[in-house]
Image (cartoon, helix red, strand yellow):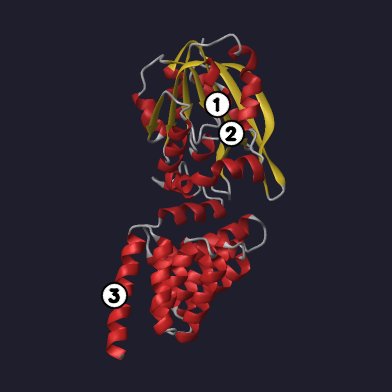
Amino acid sequence: MGRRFAEAAERLMEEAAGHVKEGRLDAAAEAYRRVLRHQPNEWIVLAHLGACERFRGRWEEAERALLRALVVRPEEPGTLNELGLVMAASGRRVDAIAFLERAVRAEPRFLQGWCNLGKMLYVEALEGEGSVARAIDCFDRILALDPEQHEFRFLRDALRGDSVPAPPPGYVAAFFDRFAATFDAKVAGKLAYTAPEVAAGMLGSWLAPRRALTVLDLGCGTGLSGSIVRDAAAHLVGVDVSHGMFERARATGLYDRLEQGELQDFLDRAEPQAHDLVLALDVFIYVGALERTVPAIARTLKPEGRAIFSVEAGEGEGYSLSRSGRYAHSRAYVEGIASSAGLRPVEAREFMVREEAGRGVPALMFLYERP
């Protein structure tokens, strides 16, 4: 009888693995539960069920399965890590950090555990609820295990206030891919994002009589910026590096043409004097140095064409990497580069681009014209 149960359990585990591979998580969870009806304390089944329930968004069921797995194998790093992810997903950050710290204590070379812990400690540090030094130490441990973890090197540099001219390749795409599905709800609701509204106000009188513009929307995201110029555009082009954002923009039907790729790569290939209007709203905060970008925008503008872009307001004469992992640019820096590129200022406006930790984030919106 025991052998038959073991064979049946093995078949069910194979069935569950197939369901997971095909994305049929409901069926996978049911297969795991069928195994547990006969083998209620099988650690690997409990662990797989917990992970499956997390992917289904069933936090309580995931927690119950994983805690049962811990009873069978106390301090098992993978289970502790998975519990940390469940706690994080359900909004229990303190508990998430506690489980992730247990995971890396149990296995000091557990890279994924360190990475998940680093993300939690970074958010804590940004929100003033945790130690910056603690987060930096975690990032140092990650980089000691794997020096190729460029995202964590970049975030460590941001927390330390180091000067970095640009994010590492792939960082921005991966960042936006993670929350493309919830982007609109988050920025419009929780973050009170205002850049499109401010840009619409600055462009309003110029746009009103026009209906045949060729418009380039850099970092188009889900189309929030493109929507303010759609009525005036005969041809609206959107560019975004994130595949998730690109797919969301395509689903809107807003754009006449979309390209997925790096902003600078697109501008370097763009035809000279091809656009009446170029938008880059809340984009330069992920670019850093603008010495190539702004002149490339100027080159692609038609005579009397306009460019409008925003930056988070920085101090001094240049730009700096903030703890948030975004760049801030001083007014003097932007105006100097725009002037060197041959752009004529039309208007500059100070505003609050979003809210973070209950405070507004100061920003600048610039409107320029190519003579």
Position of residue 26 measured from the top left corner of the image (x, y, whole percent): 43, 63
Q: What separation in Å lies between label 2 and label 1 (alpha carbons)?
A: 20 Å
Describe residue 229's horizontal placement relative to residue 246 as left or right: right
Residues packed near mark 1 inside 10 Å, few (<14), some (14 to 19) or many (20 plus): some
Describe residue 191's horizontal placement relative to residue 255 as left or right: right
Position of residue 47 measured from the top left corner of the image (x, y, whole percent): 43, 75
Describe residue 259's horizontal placement relative to residue 286 as left or right: left
Which quadrant would the N terminus be assigned to in this image? bottom left
- The residue closer to the viewer here, 273 or 212, is 212
- Tell me the residue that label 2 is attached to: 311
Q: Does residue 102 appear in the picture of this structure?
A: no
Q: Earlier in the sequence, mark 2 or mark 3?
A: 3
- Tell me the residue that label 1 is attached to: 227
Q: Residue at x 53, y 66 (%)?
A: 86
Please, what is the three-letter code of the amino acid marked with disc 2? Val
Q: Does residue 11 appear in the picture of this structure?
A: yes
Position of residue 331 measured from the top left corner of the image (x, y, whole percent): 62, 29
State the image quarter where residue 17 is shown.
bottom left
- The residue closer to the viewer here, 266 or 28, is 28
Please, what is the three-letter code of the amino acid marked with disc 3? Arg
Q: What separation in Å lies between label 3 and label 1 (alpha carbons)?
A: 52 Å
Q: Residue at x 50, y 38 (%)?
A: 288
- Tell me the residue that label 3 is attached to: 11
